[in-house]
Amino acid sequence: MVWKTLARHLAAKPAAPRHADAGTTEALSQRLKETSARKLGRSLAIRHVAAGSCNGCELELRATQNMIHDLTRYGLSFTPSPRHADVLLITGVAARNMIDAVRQAREAMPDPAFTIAAGDCAVDGGVFKGSPAITGGADSILPIDLLIPGCPPTPAAIIEALLALLEAQDPPALIMREI
Amino acid sequence: MNFCSPETWSNFAGEFIALWTDDTHAYALFKGEFLAVELTGGAYPALSVRHPGAGWFERLTKDLNGHEAQGAHHTATAIEHFRAPDGTAPWPEFATPHAEGLHQIAVGPIHAGIIEPGHFRFSVIGEKILKLEARLGYSHKGTLGLMRGKSPRLAARFAARVSGDATVAHSLAFAHAAESALHMHIPERAVFLRAVMSELERIANHTSDIGAIAGDAGFAFLDARFAWHRESFCAAAQSAFGHRLMMDVVIPGGVAADIFPAGPVAILRALDALEMELPSLQRVFEDYASLQDRLVGTGHISTHLAEKYAAGGFTGRASGRRTDARQDPGYAPYNTVALAIPVETEGDVAARIRIRLAEIVESIRLIRLFLDLPRTPIAVAPPQSSGIGLGVAESFRGSAWHWLKIESGLITNAFIADPSTLHWPLLEHAAITGIVADFPLINKSINASYSGVDL
Ligand code: SF4
């Protein structure tokens, strides 16, 4: 049975590839130039941290990895260790009980790194805005490079935003030059 | 509701469900009985001595309202971390068993996977887990406080975000509470649409969790196939209700929008695809010895323990407890369908998977029945009246209870009991039957919500 299904799906095509939105890419590349013109290349390892979510955003983040959305085909992957991560992706509000942990996760990551706030909660606190148990969105903990709105953002929206991050960077300098 | 004396309160022997307080009273919900006792000096007699499941609730009333449970053995804070303004907090004491060669493994609050935050403290000897303590409260967002002073329609947005994976169930329990407080009668079509959404949510969660457990045991094929089915249910929910998780569709008074014309076909197609492949996927589960070896006997929860904590959902049903809020106390439209409730007694990870597979089959049957929708309006407006209401809905993990106090159309007090509240202590018990490497399987097989108890 396993083999039959595997064989059948070998012939199946994956979903049509998604593309970054031109407007987002443009705005982002402007922002990256202004900040530090960080270059990380096209293969990014993402460390996800839930800083006070309802777990809806995590469901959709996980769905980016399924065989329909297939995040890894773009060179993007999630990593358990902050030490290997190029991107810190935060979901959920900045719950007071998580602020310290988020900061520590960022400190454990090598520089340079991008920070992303995914989901309305991380963008600005979402429906929980104004609660005394939170300090707001992810930008109340760390400076954020890219916002992905939505409650929760769909897997397609998450992938498109991540692709914008790839497109917005200047092409990385060729390593060959240094040899 | 029964206002009772402290003696009746302390000695009540029923099956414990939830406990909370407001400014004047402590409330305890038992199966078929709802007790209230007056607070004296901000305290009430502890129930956790007799009903261990009450422990977390008692600690929560202390953290949320400052009310003391007199006579409780376990008084550690539930969600209060005593954070300084810069976010740092004193490191809590964990109960450490004394044994030669013992060491501790600290995990979290940030976990390895894409999941919510929580801290696990394992005390181990070699590979064997002697004790597990979970420290929660990391994603405390102040949900109950935000509900106060809002109309039920507005506060429904918070109910929908108590636990995103059970958004339909929590919205439904909240709506049931508001509707009972305000004596509302819900149009038939809304009742059926709500049930369609509840069952879709159940299937979506069961498929992804079953796949994820197989994935954790290193069996990528099942993970991939079940994730594919989950995805097709999310897509069907999008075509039918305009949202992949069906958030904010169930509202007090009915549903926010009717099913889209393309919806029923999309749902039926997803059901057909799953129904066709499910028997073969189940066979893979049962036939591969290396997979069964990881699942059978792992994370065992005895019937006795499940009874003690009044475990609900598939966790309870895999340990011999025939409980399902759809049947008892029951709500429409499930009274029309002769609900099949699978029950097993093995109480291990494998049994919990079998129960969930059986529930998928039942949910497929139910959705097909419910999609024959009556032609009525889809909602009525909540009146600006007052009342107290209790509502329940069977989420994929068990019964979610909501309690609301409404005055002149505005919520003055609320409490939410996610089924996870009774399951977290069971996870601590189930973990000590295994080795560290089995913990991810055990954890996922129960899949308690963090956000649902952190509130
Ligand atoms: S943005 Fe929405 S889905 Fe995401 S964590 Fe917040 S409430 Fe949940």
Image (spheres, coloured by chain):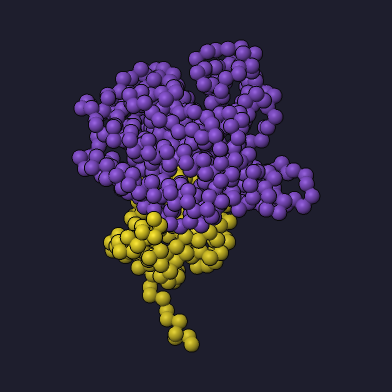
Q: Give A44 or B241, whichever is nearer the viewer.
A: B241
Quarter assignment of residue A169: bottom left
Q: Give B287 or B306, whichever is nearer the viewer.
A: B287
Seen in the picture, residue B81 relative to B26 is either above or below; the reply is below
**In this structure image, what is the colour of chain A?**
yellow
Where does the image place residue B167, in percent across and percent down from the top left?
40, 38
Seen in the picture, residue B305 relative to B281 is either above or below; the reply is above
> What residue is rendered at 54% in x and 26% in y?
B17
> What residue is rendered at 42% in x and 79% in y?
A173
Where does the image place residue A1, in percent across and percent down from the top left?
39, 55
Q: Is residue B242 visible?
A: no
The image shows a total of numbered marks equal to 0
> What residue is rendered at 39% in x and 60% in y?
A3
Q: Which chain did the renderer colour purple?
A: B
Q: Residue furthest bottom?
A: A179
Quarter assignment of residue A40: bottom left
Q: Residue furthest right?
A: B100
Q: Is residue A84 visible?
A: yes
Where does the image place residue B168, in percent across and percent down from the top left?
38, 36
Where does the image place residue A7, in percent across and percent down from the top left?
35, 62
Q: Give A15 or B5, whichever is nearer the viewer.
A: A15
| Residue B65 as seen in the image, left or right of residue B160 | right
> What residue is rendered at 67% in x and 32% in y?
B75
| Residue B203 as seen in the image, left or right of residue B23 | left
Seen in the picture, residue B333 relative to B12 is either above or below; the reply is below
